[in-house]
Image (cartoon, grey):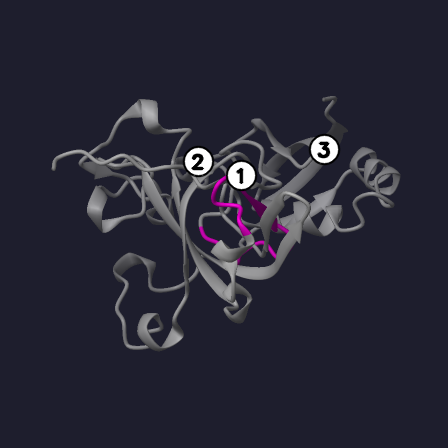
């Protein structure tokens, strides 16, 4: 068979409401946690029986926001500055022949109530609304390989930016303290990763950037490796 059909078993609920500013790997943003809501008929409690025995799981998902852009045999990994070309199969680029991704994520808890079965998840690298097609338990004895060589991605990306908040942003943080007590820390962690396009990082850059995080439009500007958060505006539903 040349073609296969897969069923979406659930959808991700995440604080990242758009592709921009999503961390490049899970585990980088402590407060960037999320939830996997399973769809019928896969939301049967028996389907997740004993899954809580595992601390981490593999999520197999669809790069649904890049599907229409097709695949590219050669891509430019952001971690290499956006200028070095590599074969798509030597990277984790979303522009693949089949837009399938994998992510290793901490399993915080199983949620089983009424007609809903879901997974509370730890730090993730997925956009809100990501379709999931499978879940597999992580097996350290088989998949943790200390001697493995990972080419250009041997080390985790460093948090390279200092982040401070303007007076306006500080006031807005105070206003959201009750509902989002972790908001300052979350924004700081996201922006410390410097989510700007890789080619922008070596040039003077006066652009004001914005990202939809949680219920907010976060705006910031970068100067001399320092990120200034200008505003954290609440978005209306």
User: Magenta segment, principal secondary structure?
Assistant: loop
Mark 1 → mark 3, Cα distance in angstroms: 16 Å
Residue drawn at point x = 55 percent, y = 54 percent: 45
Q: Neighbour class for label 1 at 10 Å: few (<14), some, many (≥20)? A: many
Q: Is residue 234 above or below residue 121?
A: above
Residue bearing the label numbered 3: 230
Residue bearing the label numbered 2: 197
Label 1 vs label 3, nearer the camera: 1
Where is residue 79 shown, x and y percent of the image?
A: 37, 49
Res. 150 image quadrant: bottom left
Mark 3 → mark 2, Cα distance in angstroms: 19 Å
Res. 174 image quadrant: top right
Front in this rendered view, residue 204 or 143: 143
User: Is residue 41 magenta-colored?
Assistant: yes
Mark 3: which secondary structure? Answer: strand
Q: Are marks 1 and 3 in contact (CB under 8 Å)?
A: no
Res. 104 image quadrant: bottom left
Residue 87 visible somewhere in the drawing: no
Q: Which mark is residue 21?
A: 1
Q: In the displayed structure, does residue 64 sit left or right of residue 211?
A: left
């Amino acid at each position: 068979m040349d073609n296969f059909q897969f069923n979406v078993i659930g959808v991700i609920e995440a604080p990242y409401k758009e592709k921009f500013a999503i961390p490049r790997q899970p585990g980088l943003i402590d407060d960037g946690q999320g939830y996997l809501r399973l769809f019928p008929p896969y939301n049967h409690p028996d389907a997740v029986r004993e899954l809580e025995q595992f601390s981490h799981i593999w999520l197999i998902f669809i790069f649904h926001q890049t599907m229409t852009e097709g695949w590219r045999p050669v891509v430019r990994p952001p971690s290499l500055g956006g200028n070095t070309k590599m074969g798509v199969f030597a990277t984790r680029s979303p522009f693949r022949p089949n837009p399938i991704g994998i992510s290793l994520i901490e399993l915080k808890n199983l949620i089983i109530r009424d007609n809903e079965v879901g997974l509370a998840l730890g730090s993730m690298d997925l956009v809100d609304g990501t379709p999931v097609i499978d879940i597999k338990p992580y097996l350290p004895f088989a998949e943790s390989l200390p001697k493995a060589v990972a080419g250009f991605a041997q080390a985790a990306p460093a948090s390279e930016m200092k982040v401070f908040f303007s007076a306006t942003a500080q006031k807005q943080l105070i206003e959201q303290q009750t509902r989002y007590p972790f908001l300052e820390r979350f924004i700081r962690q996201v922006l410390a990763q410097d989510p700007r396009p890789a080619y922008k990082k070596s040039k003077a850059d006066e652009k004001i950037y914005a990202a939809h995080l949680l219920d907010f439009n976060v705006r910031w500007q970068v100067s001399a490796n320092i990120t200034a958060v200008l505003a954290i505006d609440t978005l209306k539903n």
